Image: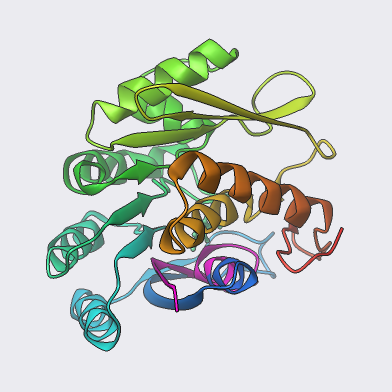
Amino acid sequence: MDFAYTIAGSEATGGAGLQTDLKTFHELGTYGLGTITCIVSFDPKNNWAHRFVPVDPQVIADQIGVAVATHDLHTVKIGMLGTPTTIDTVATALKSNEWRDIVVDPVLICKGQEPGAALDTDTALRKKILPLATVATPNNFEARTLAGMDSLTTVDDLIEAAKRISELGPNAVVVKGGMDFPGDDAVDVLWNGEAHVFTEPKIGQERVSGAGCTLAAAITARLAAGAELPQAVADAKALVTRAIRGRVEANTPFASVWQGASL
Ligand code: PXL
């Protein structure tokens, strides 16, 4: 049995966060378990505004303690943490186990939040979490923020951002070009001492919720199952492409990925 573990936020629509991670783990044949760091419930009566509640630090530490006591875990994904206090708690609790792979999706803000809210989280992630990462998976905005670059418009820019972020600690970095990347292709770059470029045609013009979470969770599941990193990223990209193609339209401003799509 391959166990894949996520430490992430709950997103109440089911379209992103821990719910998405567990669906992805299951779809890829791993046994998933998760620790909730915060609860995000968009407000349907207020234009789906972002509501965010952190989980008590002791409750986060307790969940991590029971997860590592229950199974021999060696692969973990870190998703949304949300506050500097949570970042401290998770960084400390992670040290209670020996990890082969720590995949960090450096979620600074979620869709609908103001970029300003990212500043203190950015500083704490940079100092406490990125140095623990074996793989980091920033999106375009997170990569620009962490690498200190104004824009990422070419494949060389994505590679440069990935290299700069690897200098903050992670052995490997996957930068997701996403919808902000110009052109017709969804381009992701893996830097692990050499550059690997993964390209698929963009599907539609709209952002789809949960795509980034799914990519990082799928990398985690494939690493948990023993894949080498470049193959894990290729497999993850294939699943995200399928999940975007099979997206679920909803009353929210964004459609959500669906990992179970058979398209
Ligand atoms: O997609 C980033 C993300 C991650 N985790 C949680 C979220 C979001 C975006 O809404 O709510 C919990």
Q: Inspect the magenta stretch and tell me whether residue 143 lies in it.
A: no
User: 109 or 25, which lies in front?
Assistant: 25
The type of colouring in the image is rainbow
Above or below for 95 versus 199: below
Pick the quarter of the image with the C terminus.
Answer: bottom right
User: 205 or 22, which lies in front?
Assistant: 22
Q: Say which residue appears at 69% left-offset and 59% top-offset.
A: 47
Q: Say which residue appears at 58% left-offset and 72% top-offset.
A: 29
In the picture, measured across the screen, residue 96 lies left or right of residue 238, that is left
Question: Which x, y percent locates residue 103?
Answer: 37, 52
Question: Which x, y percent locates residue 27?
Answer: 64, 70
> Toward which corner of the image does residue 20 lie, by quadrant?
bottom right
Q: Is residue 254 visible?
A: no
Above or below for 201 versus 159: below
Q: Which residues are magenta?
A: 1-21
In the picture, measured across the screen, residue 95 lies left or right of residue 43, that is left
Above or below for 154 versus 113: above
Question: Which x, y percent locates residue 51?
Answer: 50, 65
Q: Is residue 66 visible?
A: yes
Q: Say which residue appears at 69% left-offset and 70% top-offset.
A: 45
Above or below for 65 versus 124: below
